[in-house]
Image (cartoon, rainbow, N blue to C red):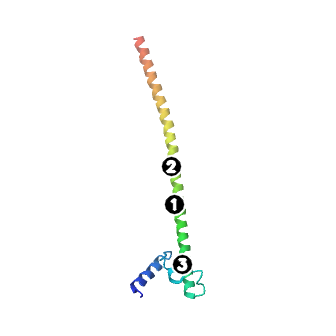
Amino acid sequence: ATRPWFDRNRRKVEATRPWFDFGEDEDAGGSDDESDGEAGDAQGGKSREMRIKTAKQKMERRIKKEEEKAKSRMVLVEEFETRLKDLDVENEEILAQMTQDFENKILRAEGEAREG
């Protein structure tokens, strides 16, 4: 009872997504380790191993890419924090200067008031 549409779709999936596991390999002919003697099953086992290997490599590349993104984000965060600290220092200096200027103006005004 083969379904030609299913086989056609399966071939499309196998061609475009070699890492995809249909989950039927175990049910069809037992485990791959036991069926080395039969050429078809052995070939199926190798292609499954290749799909698994390809999937692992793809996942490792994705993880590596995510780690690189995370590192670059951390660099940006560190640069941002450094800039914030610099701004805090600048603001403290500006505030101190403004306070000093304000105190000087008050002292000058008091001095002029006493003289006048």
Q: Position of residue 60 (x, y in %)?
A: 55, 66
Residue 77: which disc?
2
Q: Give the CA distance from mark 2 to mark 3.
A: 43 Å
- N-terminal of the pair, mark 1 or mark 2, is 1
According to the image, label 3 marks what residue?
A: 48
Q: Residue at x 45, y 18 (%)?
A: 107
Q: Residue at x 42, y 15 (%)?
A: 110
Q: Position of residue 106 (x, y in %)?
A: 43, 20
Which is nearer the eye, 47 or 110? 47
Whether tag 1 and tag 2 are in contact, CB under 8 A, the answer is: no
Q: Position of residue 36 (x, y in %)?
A: 60, 84
Q: Residue at x 46, y 27 (%)?
A: 99
Helix, strand or loop at disc 1? helix
Which is nearer the eye, 8 or 76? 8
According to the image, label 1 marks what residue?
A: 66
Which kind of residue does numbered mark 3 sit on? Arg
Q: Position of residue 15 (x, y in %)?
A: 47, 80
- N-terminal of the pair, mark 1 or mark 3, is 3
Q: Is residue 110 above or below residue 58?
A: above
Q: Give the CA distance from mark 1 to mark 2.
A: 16 Å
> Mark 2 or 3, which is nearer the eye?
3
Which is nearer the eye, 69 or 56? 56
